[in-house]
């Protein structure tokens, strides 16, 4: 039963200063992780056509780009590499090269910005000739257990370079347990393990694959990434990864999976990351470019939605424009 006319919710909304008393804070910059892309060489800033506002950087230009980002208080970055002149093979073995672009970048960034938390994506799709996230067997299927052997070397090479967080995204069974084991036995017991735990086979990764050159040559990733039509299995992925020793869980993409984010938030005590993916980013950029929506408004509304659903860490391409788009 409504108590109108005594009860009037509009009283709470009468002025900006009253509203401010009740509104939740926008998540602060420390909770943002900026995903960014590396290229080999120097003095390179290559705009990514499908993700306006995002670039591929060589290490030197990335260090320059990080200056204002660190000054805004952004908490962390997530690095994606490319095979470059080390080349691609069936296994993706250039991903664990000691002098790979990611490994060099981690060293350079930790030296220049020791206070910035550095996370690395641990996957093989940018390093395999076929573009899948692990080696293919004779039936052209990704061989799960062979992939583990490569992924754990990649994770250790990143930790060895100084990464604070390694983030396996290949969706191989057992990858968290395997990587934790090798990190621990190879001297990296303090490296955080952020699992891309509930990661869907999504049509919203298109712009990213363009940026990374990681479009699968044949087939798709439905053989390993979770189905958005089987949410219980997708939740089990997070439960299993927690049992395998993940330190941080993730839901990816974010905006179309807020229901599952809330479910995981309620059933786990682990920190939870939301990956606001490339397609979700470019969709808003395109809408704003067409003059059909206000970018700041759309970014803030969607960011608040992820925080409300229970995300602690926001992996977001908006992070490099925090001041302009997210600061109150
Ligand atoms: C690698 C990986 C992908 C993304 C992050 N890590 C692509 C994929 O799984 O195909 C997507 C990120 C984005 O779209 O922003 N496996």
Image (cartoon, rainbow, N blue to C red):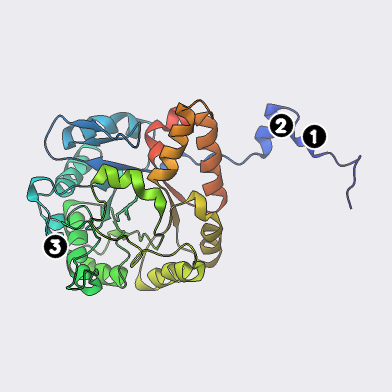
Mark 1 vs 2: CB contact within 8 A: yes
Residue 89, horizontal then vertical, whole percent: 11, 59
Closer-to-camera residue (63/89)? 89
* Location of mark 3 (residue): 90
Instruction: Tell me where residue 323 appears, x and y as whole percent.
Output: 44, 29
State the mark number for residue 18: 2
Cα–Cα gap, marks 1 and 3 = 64 Å
Q: Earlier in the sequence, mark 1 or mark 3?
A: 1
Asked which secondary structure carries label 2, the reply is helix
Q: Is residue 70 visible?
A: yes
At x 54%, y 39%, the residue is 26
Q: Quadrant of residue 321?
A: top left
Residue corresponding to mark 1: 11
Give the quadrant of residue 196: bottom left
* Pointer 1 local density, CA inside 10 Å: few below 14, some 14–19, many at least 20: few
Q: In this view, does 278 lie above or below 291?
A: below
């Amino acid at each position: 039963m409504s108590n109108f006319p005594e009860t009037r919710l509009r009283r709470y909304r009468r002025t900006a200063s009253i509203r401010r008393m009740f509104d939740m804070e926008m998540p602060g910059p420390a909770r943002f992780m900026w995903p960014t892309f590396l290229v080999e060489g120097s003095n390179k800033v290559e705009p990514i056509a499908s993700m306006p506002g995002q670039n591929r950087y060589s290490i030197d230009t990335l260090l320059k780009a990080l200056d204002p980002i660190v000054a805004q208080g952004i908490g962390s970055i997530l690095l994606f590499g490319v095979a470059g002149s080390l080349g691609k093979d069936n296994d993706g073995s250039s991903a664990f090269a000691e002098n790979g672009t990611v490994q060099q970048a981690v060293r350079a960034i930790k030296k220049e910005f020791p206070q910035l938390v550095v996370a690395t994506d641990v996957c093989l799709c940018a390093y395999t000739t076929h573009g899948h996230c692990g080696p293919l067997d004779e039936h052209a299927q990704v061989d799960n257990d062979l992939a583990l052997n490569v992924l754990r070397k990649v994770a250790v090479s990143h930790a060895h370079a100084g990464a604070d967080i390694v983030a396996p995204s290949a969706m191989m069974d057992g990858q968290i347990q395997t990587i934790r084991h090798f990190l621990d036995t190879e001297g990296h017991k303090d490296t955080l393990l952020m699992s891309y735990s509930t990661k869907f086979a999504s049509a919203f990764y298109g712009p990213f694959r363009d940026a990374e050159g990681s479009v699968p040559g044949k087939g798709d990733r439905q053989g390993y990434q979770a189905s958005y039509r089987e949410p219980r299995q997708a939740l089990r992925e997070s439960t299993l990864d927690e049992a395998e020793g993940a330190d941080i869980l993730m839901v990816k993409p974010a905006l179309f999976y807020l229901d599952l984010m809330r479910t995981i938030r309620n059933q786990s005590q682990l920190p939870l990351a939301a990956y606001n993916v490339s397609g979700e980013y470019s969709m808003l950029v395109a809408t704003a470019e067409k003059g059909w929506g206000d970018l700041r408004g759309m970014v803030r509304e969607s960011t608040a939605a992820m925080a409300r659903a229970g995300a602690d860490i926001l992996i977001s391409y908006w992070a490099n424009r925090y001041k302009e788009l997210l600061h109150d």
